[in-house]
Image (tube, grey):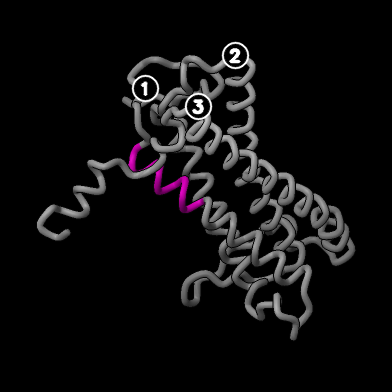
Amino acid sequence: MMRPHFDMLEERTDNAPVHYSRTAMLFHWSIAALVLFEFASALSFRLFNPGELGYVHSAYRWHMSSGMILLVASLSCVIWRLLHAYPLLPHDMSAMTRALAKSAHILLYVFIIMVPFTGWLILSARRSPVGMLSNFHWPQLDLISHSDYSQRVKINDTLVPIHAVLSYAGMCLVALHVLASFYHHFWRGDEVLTRMLPSRVDLDHLNPPGNK
């Protein structure tokens, strides 16, 4: 029976893979695309007015829908991560650097969960329907949506700045994450970046010699 790996801050040597699995890569790059889309769509309706170049009419609706998809994907990713082995950091990294890297990864997980979750709370306070597929709408949190108007206004006014601060702080973490991957690839010359990319074996499997 598969046991959860609750030691995300600990070193593990038991069956640690060298390369991330296809599932891990799918989670990573899908969530990365959703995070960037969420941030860009938020900038569109927060910084620009209708008629301006940067304003997209459907940005708010897309932001709500993709945010709920991000929440589901992020929770699924964390559960998957806890249940599977994953590549270790290079052994020649200093203890301080390893601790910083692991802390940054945990903060990234907090970011991709808490930002869409606080968005869900805000939407529930506003009683804003979130259309997903066809006639399906994302459920609201009854505890909040059934509160009286003054309470919902207070919840909204409290959470909106928190949601914004978490978003900007999270994007700074994302930028740091990208820079760190470039540092590993171009300066250290290790495989921290490339092991999250499709391997030559995977590419050859998708592109047999006869199809090239």
Callout 3 amino acid:
Arg
Upstream in sequence: badge 3 or badge 2: 2
Q: Secondary structure at mark 3?
A: helix
Q: Main secondary structure of the magenta part?
A: helix
Task: Give the CA distance from mark 1 to mark 2.
Answer: 19 Å
The N terminus sits in image quarter: top left
Q: Is residue 24 left or right of residue 99?
A: left
| Label 1 Cα neighbours within 10 Å, binned few <14 / some 14-19 / many ≥20 | some
Q: Which residues are magenta?
A: 21-31
SS category of the residue bearing label 1: loop
Examine the structure image and report whether residue 22 is included in the region drawn in magenta: yes
Q: Is residue 42 above or below residue 80?
A: below
Which residue is at the front of the view, 86 or 67?
86
Q: Which residue is mark 2?
A: 95
Residue closer to the observer: 51 or 110: 51
Write the residue at 64% across / 45% down.
175
What x and y, as percent, mark residue 143? 72, 55
Question: Circle 1 sits on which residue?
Answer: 16
Residue 144: x %, y % from top left: 75, 57
As drawn, the label of residue 188 is: 3
Image: 134 above or below 94: below
Relative image position of residue 37 (x, y in whole percent): 58, 62
Q: Is residue 168 left or right of residue 35?
A: right
Q: Is residue 184 above or below residue 55?
A: above
Q: Amino acid at mark 1?
A: Ala
